[in-house]
Image (cartoon, rainbow, N blue to C red):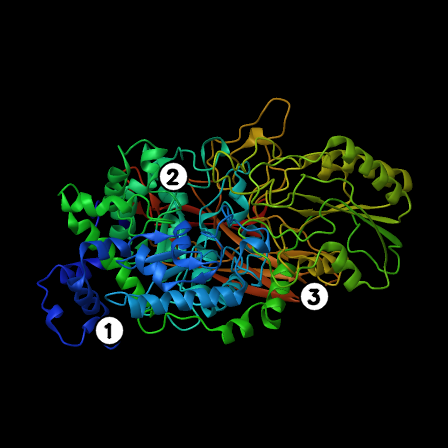
Amino acid sequence: MIVNRRGAIGLLAGGSLSVLAIAQSPAAFAQASVPLYKDARAPIPARVADLMARMTLAEKIAQIRTAWTAKGNMIDGLAFNPVKASAAFPDNIGHVTRPSDKRGVPGITGAAGGTAARWRTPRETVDFINSLQRWALEDTRLGIPVLVHEESLHGYMATEATMFPQAIALAGTFDTDLMRAVQSVIAREVRARGVPLVLSPVVDIVRDPRWGRIEECWGECPHLCAEMGVAAVEGLQGPGRFERLAPGKVFATLKHMTGHGQPEAGNNISPAQLSERELRENFLPPFREIVRRTSVGAVMPSYNEIDGVPSHANAWLLGDVLRGEWGFDGIVASDYGGVHELATLHKVARDLEDAAHQALLAGVDSELPEGTAFAVLEEAVEAGRIPAALVDTACARMLTFKFRAGLFESPFGSWEQTQALTGNAEARALALEAARKSMCLLTNKGALPLDENRMGRVAVIGPNHAITRLGGYSSVPRQTISLIEGLRQVAPAGDFVTAQGVFITTSEDRSQSDVQLAPRAENLRLIARAAEVARSADTVILAIGDTEQTSREGFATTHLGDRTDIDIVGEQNELVDALSAVCRERGTPLIVCAINGRPPSWPNVIGKADAVLECWYPGQEGGIAMAEALLGRINPGAKLPVSVVRNEGQIPLFYNRKPSSRRGYLFDDASPLFAFGHGLSYTSFEISAPRVAKSAFGTGEEVAVEVDVANTGPHAGDEVVQLYITRHSVSVTRPLLELKGFRRVTLEPGESRTLTFTITPAQLAFWNRAMVEVNEPGPVVLAAGNSSARLEATEIVIS
């Protein structure tokens, strides 16, 4: 069965063709006494055509440009000034970047989060957006509202908004219903302030833990990323396909298309050395699945190049594939600086004009964050060097987007809704649920759960024990709870003593570009003090890992975030050694809470700890969830969304590897430290081999699979049943395992359940030697289990 055939469809394929055709027709609509574009009942294509017929070239170009630092030209202090705006933006402005931050205010530069001083308050944000929109509607010639966008990776990146667990932690829940609920809360908090577009989710698969942005991703598996991506977009936008955005919802942006998660040497924005087959089978599927199943509003190209062509100039990627093969009809918004970097970084454009031309040809509709390259378009178009039709196409798409978002009818934020929704009790409860479900038990030698009646004095030690680590793309929520605060709330009668152990870096400001490790001499003194505290205790809990400085986006050569050493940094391993020695001497358990953005490639820690609880960055309520997991109030049920390597020499390592990979190494183990899908529990489960109704299926048939799961242990708990396939004896090599289904279930002791999965012909298909996507005849192994390393199998045949 042929599922898809590769083909070049052309740059302008997709839903914008009809809009563009009308927009380029004779300007009959311009004669109407009442502008059609202001009639909310009129079809959107007709409204776009009417409006574009009235626009000058300068006004069209303004719609595809953005203002970030240029916000300084429209404000006095933090207040919007319509007189200054009219002088600075006589043709209106299409798009404003991050209205919640203070960019443009003197003294505010890298507004990347971290301190409240970089952000407007919620009231200031609403006031700014509403004043901006009143000016656009009332003081500009055509009254076109302004599009504004914000970041919302794991919560609205703005003051007082709810901060959920980091993306990699949410992926580890393997819970699409939870993802949908989390993103729905994010959407309503964002939309209440008057923002209809967010730059999330990140659906890149990731294969390199050296890369500082790994925490922003949902792991290495195309199927997991796709299903989490669909759920996230449905939470942000609403389910299914639609024309107009519903109240309380925001348009999502798929980031970053593509190859971003496996950069050369793990360095952010470096080339992605990937073949077309690798792209189509692993990196593109999450994007394709979301585009096909939702009305996702926007896609953002990646910074990197593929086969010599940067994504922002890649007409095959953004035109033939995205708009042509998949039928995407939203906007393509550049990553920050991605257009002008065609000239300044990649050196494929002669100058800014050439960069703008190449980006428009590829299908980029909006240049973020400032519109630096698009600023030169007017003179180039008037001189005939760049076709006006390229500007028309991008402008038509941007206007269509604004009509779909309802901005012409309701562009304003609501202070009342903002007060009622931002970080409210419901949102806080969901943040706690998400944190609970993201706890992943990596190892346990019987040390967990702790018994409050027998744990005695508990020493809580480490650089992450008394601070709430939120991770990248966070702001300052209304409240946070650290590990020690959580322990004292959950077990108020407990005897807890604390010690710093070490500091990791000299600063906690993630916006700070220069990162310095904490002084070694001071850390050695702190380690000695921590060992003394541990000697006085009956149980030791050690909170170690990363900071928002040691694992982060390296967005400039002066602001790095990638590392060559993926073990814990600084003197943390020496702290582990010292406490391990004390615990062995005294016979007390050493329990590690891993609070981190990168996966825990910490062989020394894993070898010496009596239990390791992977907490990731668990969000604002994480302290409660960590304490509950340690004390057995909840049963950890998350799984690893990535394979955890033992050291840098194994990179890249991923579960869906080919048969010839990972033969072995001299003097080392080729297996991962932890397998994809791994995660323990305080109870035990049995998962059956997959059952099917027959042994042979046609190429066009769905395969219905049943799997039994039973809780055979003493505690209630969650298990994630994972269903994999293996294809062999076909025309091209196939991965040893491919995840095709998963389900998280809660079972009481002794309870069992039969789960049903459906594998479609499309899920069995792959790209053959002719690069045709086809479900070839041949054997298929179906395997079920609770990790990629613990499976029971059944074989069927596709005929």
Percent coordinates x, y for residue 661 in the rendering: 49, 31
Residues at marks 2 and 3 touching, judged by CB atoms closer than 8 Å: no
Q: Given this view, does label 2 or label 1 mark the residue nearer the observer? A: 1
Numbered mark located on residue 750 in the image: 3
Choose mark 1 or mark 3, whichever is in front.
1
- Expressed as whole percent of the image width and height from the top left, the position of residue 48 reads 21, 65
Residue 354 visible? The answer is yes
Name the residue that disc number 2 marks. 278
Of marks 2 and 3, which one's residue comes earlier in the chain?
A: 2
Residue to which mark 1 is pinned: 38
Task: Give residue 49's position: percent from left, percent from top.
Answer: 17, 65
The part of the image, by quadrant, that contains residue 163 is: bottom right
Calculate the distance from the C-alpha at mark 1 to the C-alpha at mark 3.
63 Å
**Residue at x-position 71% and y-position 47%:** 464
Q: Can residue 2 be seen in the rendering of this structure?
A: no
Query: Viewer-proximal residue, 403 or 436?
Result: 403
Q: Which amino acid, by three-letter code, is at mark 2? A: Glu
Amino acid type, callout 1: Lys
Query: Which residue appears at 40% of the width and 36% of the height?
Result: 733
Q: Distance between the Cα atoms at labels 2 and 3? A: 44 Å
Q: Alpha-carbon distance for marks 2 and 1?
A: 47 Å
Amino acid, disc 3: Gly
Q: Give the mark nearer the N terminus: 2 vs 1.
A: 1
Given residues 154 and 449, the one toward you in this image is: 154
- Residue 770: quarter of image: top left
Q: Secondary structure at mark 2?
A: helix
Q: Is residue 709 left or right of residue 354?
A: right
